[in-house]
């Protein structure tokens, strides 16, 4: 992973990818919950619980990375590094924010008790 590119204009691509993915998952889960007539606590909280990601996204980007590097073309290598950076940083953000949002969703839905110290 090229960390220097993370602090460059690529950060906008990362944010667009992350936000688009979050919006897509939220709209899809909310809509499908409403269409299938799930209880209100489900369709209001399900979108918050789906933000985390890791395994599949990293596996697919690793596969794409290896295939692009194997082409042995500089442009393909640049794209491979760019894809890896975008997905890896997005996964990092999702794995920091996702569990917090999941806890909020589970607390709001009444599935777990809120612990206040």
Image (spheres, rainbow, N blue to C red):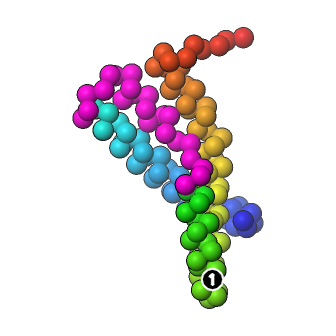
| Residue drawn at the location 32% of the way across and 33% of the way down | 33
Whether residue 87 is visible: no
Q: Residue at position x 62%, y 88% from top?
A: 73
Residue 115 location, x and y as percent?
65, 13
Q: Residue furthest top?
A: 117
Q: Which image quarter holds the C terminus? A: top right
Element type where label 1 sits in the image? helix
The image shows residue 40, relative to residue 80, as above or below, that is above
Image check: 44 left or right of 51? left
Task: Judge left or right: residue 17 versus residue 116.
Answer: left
Q: Position of residue 43 (x, y in %)?
A: 36, 29
For residue 62, which quarter of the picture? bottom right
Q: Is residue 115 magenta?
A: no
Is 76 above or below relative to 24? below
Quadrant location of residue 40?
A: top left
Q: Tell me how many marks there are.
A: 1
How many residues crowd around disc 1 within 10 Å: few (fewer than 14), some, or many (20 or more)?
few
Rendering coords of residue 90 (x, y %): 60, 53
- Read off the residue under disc 1: 70
Residue beneath the point at 72% across and 65% down: 1
Magenta stretch containing residue 38, yes or no? yes
Taking the image as drawn, is residue 21 in sight?
yes
Estimate the x, y position of residue 94 in percent, counting from the top left: 60, 45
Residue interval drawn in magenta: 35-56
- 63 or 18: which is nearer to us? 63
Residue 46 placement: quadrant: top left
């Amino acid at each position: 992973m090229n960390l220097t590119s993370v602090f460059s204009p690529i950060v906008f691509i990362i944010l667009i990818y992350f936000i688009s993915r979050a919006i897509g998952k939220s709209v899809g889960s909310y809509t499908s919950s409403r269409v299938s007539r799930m209880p209100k606590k489900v369709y209001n909280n399900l979108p918050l619980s789906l933000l985390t990601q890791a395994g599949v996204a990293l596996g697919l980007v690793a596969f794409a990375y290896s295939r692009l590097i194997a082409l042995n073309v500089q442009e393909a290598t640049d794209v491979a590094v760019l894809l890896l950076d975008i997905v890896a940083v997005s996964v990092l953000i999702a794995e920091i924010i996702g569990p917090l949002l999941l806890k909020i969703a589970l607390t709001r839905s009444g599935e777990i008790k809120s612990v206040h110290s």
